[in-house]
Image: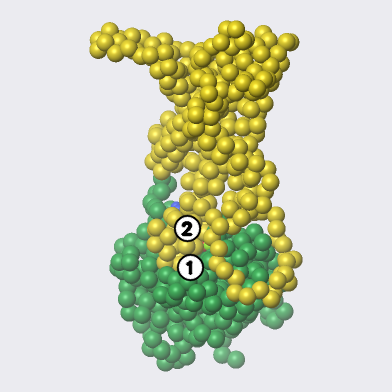
Chain colours: A yellow, B green
Amino acid sequence: MTAEANTQHELFAMPEQRSLWQDALEQLMRNRLAIFGVFVALLLVFVSIFGPWLSPYDYTQQNLFRINEGPSLDHWLGTDGLGRDMLTRILHGARTAFLVGLIVTIGTTVLGVVLGAAGAFLGGWVDATVMRMADITMAFPDILLAAFISVVFREKVLELQLQIQEQYGWTLSESNRVYLDYLVIFGALTLVQWYGKARLVRGQILSLREKEFIEAERALGASNWTIILNHLVPNSLGPLIVSITVGFGGAMLSEASLSFLGVGIQPPGASWGEMISDSLGQWRFNPHLVLMPGIVLAIVVLGFNFLGDGLNDALNPEQRRR
Amino acid sequence: MGTDRGSQPEIPLTDGTEPDGIPLLQIKALHTQFETKQGTVRAVDGLSLDLYEGEVLGLVGESGCGKTMTALSIMRLLPGNGQAVAGEIKFEGKNLLECSSEEMKRIRGGQIAMVFQEPMTALTPTMTIGRQISEAMEIHLDLSRDEARERALELLEHVGIPSPRARFDNYIHQFSGGMRQRVMIAIAFSCEPRLLLADEPTTALDVTVQAQILDLIKQLAQEAGMTALFITHDMGIVAGSCDRVAVMYAGRMVEIGPVDDVLLNPRHPYTQGLLGSVPSLDSKPGDRLFSVSGLPPDLASLPTGCKFWPRCPLADDRCREEEPMLEQYGESQAACWKVMPLRVE
Ligand SMILES: Nc1ncnc2c1ncn2[C@@H]1O[C@H](COP(=O)(O)OP(=O)(O)OP(=O)(O)O)[C@@H](O)[C@H]1O
Ligand code: SF4
Ligand SMILES: [Mg+2]
């Protein structure tokens, strides 16, 4: 392909041997948008862990004398319709977003890798079943299906909770009910978003199995482990990592959509989507109440997409521009 | 399986028929089969072949006649549904078909190396060229990373990659097809194997590059005193690069002999057909000249008698019923009932 670049730095001393990962990291660090993505991701992790200690208020604490306020010294981003501190709720929304992103991504990755690999390796009816399930899931619009699942499941989970309460006398406090919301959202989004990774993993395995370089490796006398670790994994992991990163942002966006529609995180839980829908009535008078969570959501999702793009370029040597 | 079917007649090796010495590789009545829904595909069907120390043997034949499967049987790298069900492949006195998989790993790449047809896909896209060349040496030669790297640089230079230091950390997409094949060759020669299996190493390259790559392989093999099996469709390559040539049809050998003899005096009608499609200046008037018409046989249901009769212009009843064995004619051997004894001029 490129016959140029032959004559570059001929004078260099012994080239160090480099691995794909080293090269990828270096490449990633050169990509400004990806750096932005890394920064956003790290900030999100930090805020979602330490958020509650960063502000003097509680995210459910209401002050009905000070509702729908603009930014001020003691409420930097103002207050919402119930007089809750906006900054605190946005910080807490970060925790929701991060948790949803993390758990849904883990769920879809595990489900996708297991089902996709099972389909590729076992073939036959296993493969057919997995792929038909993927087709069916894919045929429905994600958000509609997730909304449906979450509505149906919420009832079931609430029933279950009531039963437990009656039988064992456990009562769940208000804030614990938020975790029920989480559970429902995690489940719904995982069930809706697994198929992408399953198809990806299956395709990767099927195509790599036929690749000549795998056979060429065998012809070199390489052991199975060498082949798997040095050749199979690097060649299939790249696309999966990219899909995981982009899926992270996607899951957060889906959660926000569900909460915006009122079938996601329920009040008083804090979610950026729910904050937007809550304050929508104030759009004319206090646009910042809608804008703040909206902008934060956009930046975070964008950051993850940039990171995904950057990883895609960095992990795929053919995409590298030198 | 009739193991002695198709094996060569016992003829003393004194008449210059074959190179002197003991064979490095001895294939005896090899049967390689695939179990498929259509039945048993006999990809290699009773092939016997000796490769002598230091010679370059060309293996030719139409697409699908079993050339690649012969090489993969030697490497024990047959696809999942394929198996060498009978016969022997002796390499330095050891039957490869009975070696443990650990032994095979040591032999592969270390003592027998293979160059594949497709340089575009036979290298890993996510590993630098330098690492890929070092890898085999780290496996077989017990070299440290630094030593392997040092030798990999030498090899890159030796196979004619310009500015190897700058190229060391490149990935394959930064290399042209010809350069990739040079890298494959560097890998194949890295552990100084005794036997090289080259499966159509130049088919995927354009003509000028083909010649360079062939010269390179020839030169390196000569330097190292290596034995090589050259698989190809191309009689031109055979004429230019090989010492002997073996012609395969439907999984068995139909003719074998020194290159000059076989190319000038092809005895088997199939060989004549293959050569007939190559225009030749010194074909004499009256020579039988034709290209092979018709389709290659279905390896899952072979005809009785001579496997070539459905396409052979000379076929008669005997050909349809009895299978001819390899017989000595002059310096070569051929398996055909209708071969005339060599004209004495
Ligand atoms: N996995 C398989 N299952 C069934 N049959 C196979 C399989 N692989 C190869 N064969 C059959 O084995 C026969 C020999 O194939 P082989 O690849 O050795 O041919 P070849 O002489 O190398 O041809 P080419 O010149 O096209 O490379 C072919 O007819 C093919 O149909
Ligand atoms: S044996 Fe008969 S059919 Fe076979 S190649 Fe010779 S002449 Fe043709
Ligand atoms: Mg082949």
Residue type at mark 2 is Asn
For label 2, count other residues whose C-alpha is less than 10 Å away and answer few (under 14), some (14-19) or many (20+).
Answer: some
- Tell me: residue A265, above or below residue B136: above
Q: Is residue A2 left or right of residue B82?
A: right
Picture quarter with the N terminus of chain B: bottom left
Residue A57, x across and y down, in percent: 53, 20
Residue B103, x across and y down, in percent: 33, 70
Which element is circle 2 on? helix
**Number of numbered labels in the structure image:** 2
- Tell me: residue A51, above or below residue A266: below
Residue type at mark 1 is Glu
The reply to whether dot 2 and dot 1 touch (C-beta < 8 Å) is: yes
**Residue tagged by mark 1?**
B135
Please indicate, yes or no, whether residue A297 appears anywhere in the rendered image: yes
Which element is circle 1 on? helix
Picture quarter with the C terminus of chain B: bottom right
Q: Is mark 1 within 8 Å of ligand 3?
A: no
Please indicate, yes or no, whether residue B230 appears anywhere in the rendered image: no
Residue A93 vs residue B131, the one in the foreground: A93
**Residue tagged by mark 2?**
A230
For label 1, count other residues whose C-alpha is less than 10 Å away and answer few (under 14), some (14-19) or many (20+).
Answer: many
Residue at screen point 54% across, 77% down: B150
Residue at screen point 56% across, 39% down: A42
